Image (cartoon, rainbow, N blue to C red):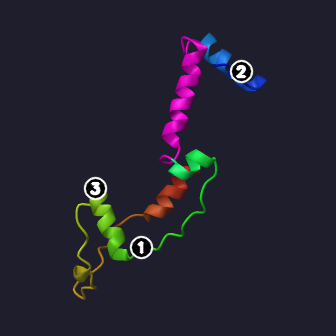
Amino acid sequence: MTIRLPEDLQQFVDDAVRTGRYARKADVIRDALTRLKEAMPEEAPATERRTGRAEPAQPKKPRSKEAFHRRLIAMGLMSHLPDTAADFEDPDDQPIVIRGEPLSETVIRERR
């Protein structure tokens, strides 16, 4: 297989080998293609592979809040849903007084 690259990309490949980052030019190309493959979306539909064009995308239905939460749990991003019934304002809760300057003022002062 012969690959023709623009001059700037060819220089990039040469520099990667010259600096010792890669042993051969083929290794640079292989790594770049592997990263591209990982970054691309899942495999194209069969019709796109045969014809070279994509079918018009079907509009997706919006998910309900419950379906979204079930999906997060199935993916392992959440272990359980928070109990929203427990969220209420307790009239007995009193703010705690903390002496010193507010945190926001401390951050602003230290960044100057």
Secondary structure beneath dot 1 equals loop
Instruction: Answer whether labels 2 and 1 touch (C-beta < 8 Å).
Output: no
Q: Quadrant of residue 18?
A: top right
Secondary structure beneath dot 2 equals helix
Give the residue at x 51% y 49%. Answer: 46
The Cα atoms of the two marked residues, 1 and 3, are separated by: 18 Å
Q: Residue 92: x, y in percent?
A: 21, 86
Is residue 18 something that shows in the picture? yes
Q: What stretch of residues is rendered in magenta?
A: 19-43
The residue pinned by badge 3 equals 76
Is residue 77 something that shows in the picture? no
Secondary structure beneath dot 3 equals loop
In terms of secondary structure, what is the magenta stretch mainly? Answer: helix
Q: Residue 61: x, y in percent?
A: 47, 73
Q: How crowded is mark 3: few (under 14 residues within 10 Å), some or many (20 or more)?
A: few
Q: Residues within 10 Å of mark 2 (few under 14, many from 20)?
A: few
Return the residue found at the far front.
50
The residue pinned by badge 1 equals 63
